[in-house]
Amino acid sequence: MPATHHIEPTIANVRWGAFDAAFAPVKEVDPGDLVILECVSGAKEVMPPPAAA
């Protein structure tokens, strides 16, 4: 049975203004697995503080 992976936007895995294959993987998945990605939109200045999660 395929696994479900949920990836939240955290300080450890958010990249601002860059997408590069040189970044370490956040998660490794198998073919057929379901991956749910959450994202954020906006500049750092307009994002809520981490404690407001």
Image: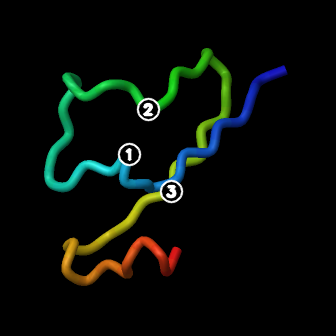
Q: Which residue is mark 3?
A: 38
9 is higher (above) or lower (below) than 1: below
Give coordinates of residue 28: x percent, y percent. 52, 21
Which residue is rendered at x = 32% and y = 70% of the image?
41
Q: What amino acid is at disc 2?
A: Val
Which residue is rendered at x = 26% and y = 74% of the image?
42
Give coordinates of residue 33: x percent, y percent. 67, 26
Q: Which residue is mark 2?
A: 26
Q: Which residue is mark 1?
A: 12
Of residue 32 and residue 47, the one placed in the foreground of this image is: 47
Of residue 53 and residue 8, the one placed in the foreground of this image is: 53
> Which residue is situated farthest in the left direction here?
17
Which residue is rendered at x = 44% and y = 55% of the image?
9
Q: Secondary structure at mark 3?
A: loop
> Left or right: 33 with respect to 26?
right
Give coordinates of residue 1: x percent, y percent. 85, 20
**Quarter of image, res 2:** top right
Give coordinates of residue 25: x percent, y percent. 38, 26
Q: What amino acid is at disc 3?
A: Glu
Of residue 52 and residue 7, the one placed in the foreground of this image is: 52
> Left or right: 27 with respect to 15?
right
Q: CA distance from mark 2 to mark 3?
A: 13 Å
Residue 48, numbered circle: none
> Which residue is situated farthest in the right direction here?
1
Evaluate if marks 2 and 1 touch, with contact meaning CB atoms under 8 Å apart.
yes
The earlier-in-sequence mark between 2 and 3 is 2
Q: CA distance from mark 2 to mark 1?
A: 9 Å
Of residue 41 and residue 27, the one placed in the foreground of this image is: 27
Observer-side mark, 2 or 3, equals: 2
